Amino acid sequence: MTCFVYGTLMYPEVLSALISRVPRSEPALIRGYQRYAIRGQVFPGTVVSTADASVQGLVLFDLRPQELEMFDEFEGDEYFKQDVQAELLESGDSMPTSIYIWQDRLRPLLQGEWDPEAFRQQRLDSYVEMCRGFAADVQAQRGWKGNFPTSSEDEEGSGGGAEQVAAGGSGGGTP
């Protein structure tokens, strides 16, 4: 399975903290979407935009079902998953993948462009620590022991994402 990521999930340190590995990835973009900073948060949101808009990010490959479950938990209810076409930048090939889109009801919180380099320099270390704690909580709730599971022997869990937890709430996240 694949997923297009455009925010904090582009950083190997964040992926490792959440799913205990860094999946193979390729630079990609999606057209017709725009990435924004979110007022009061360190993570971005992406929404449908004009046809000439685009968002650069990465397509993550060979994701396991449990890893996608972790991403679902991490993103919380501020985002919904949607299928999109991503253009791989190296080959120019187009491929179907999924993406986490910022909820329309929360559009008023979007403001300006999100700066990936500023995030890396100013927030990455503390964010990775938050992600480690979030992943440990999800693993404990689901009964996943040790490293991230590689089989589907887990049960369904309840929502609440890391981003909202980091902001003092109870759920939310960023791809």
Image (cartoon, rainbow, N blue to C red):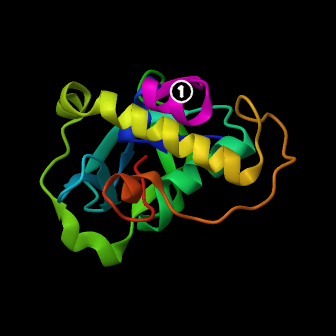
Residue sitting at 57 percent across and 55 percent down?
Answer: 72
Graded by Cα atoms within 10 Å as few (under 14), some (14 to 19) or many (20 or more), the crowding at tag 1 reads: some
Badge 1 is on which residue? 16
- Against 91, is 72 above or below? below
User: 59 or 143, which is in the foreground?
Assistant: 143
Q: Quick one: SS at disc 1?
A: helix
Q: Is residue 5 left or right of residue 145?
A: left
Residue sitting at 42 percent across and 53 percent down?
Answer: 173
Q: Position of residue 25 (x, y in %)?
A: 53, 26
Q: Position of residue 122 (x, y in %)?
A: 19, 30
Q: Position of residue 105 (x, y in %)?
A: 33, 78
Q: Is residue 25 magenta?
A: yes
| First to last magenta residue range | 13-28
- Against 148, is 100 above or below? below
Q: Position of residue 7 (x, y in %)?
A: 35, 41
User: Amino acid type of disc 1?
Assistant: Ser
User: 91 or 133, which is in the foreground?
Assistant: 133
Q: Is residue 57 visible?
A: no
User: How many badges with numbers are in the image?
Assistant: 1
Residue sitting at 77 percent across and 48 percent down?
Answer: 143
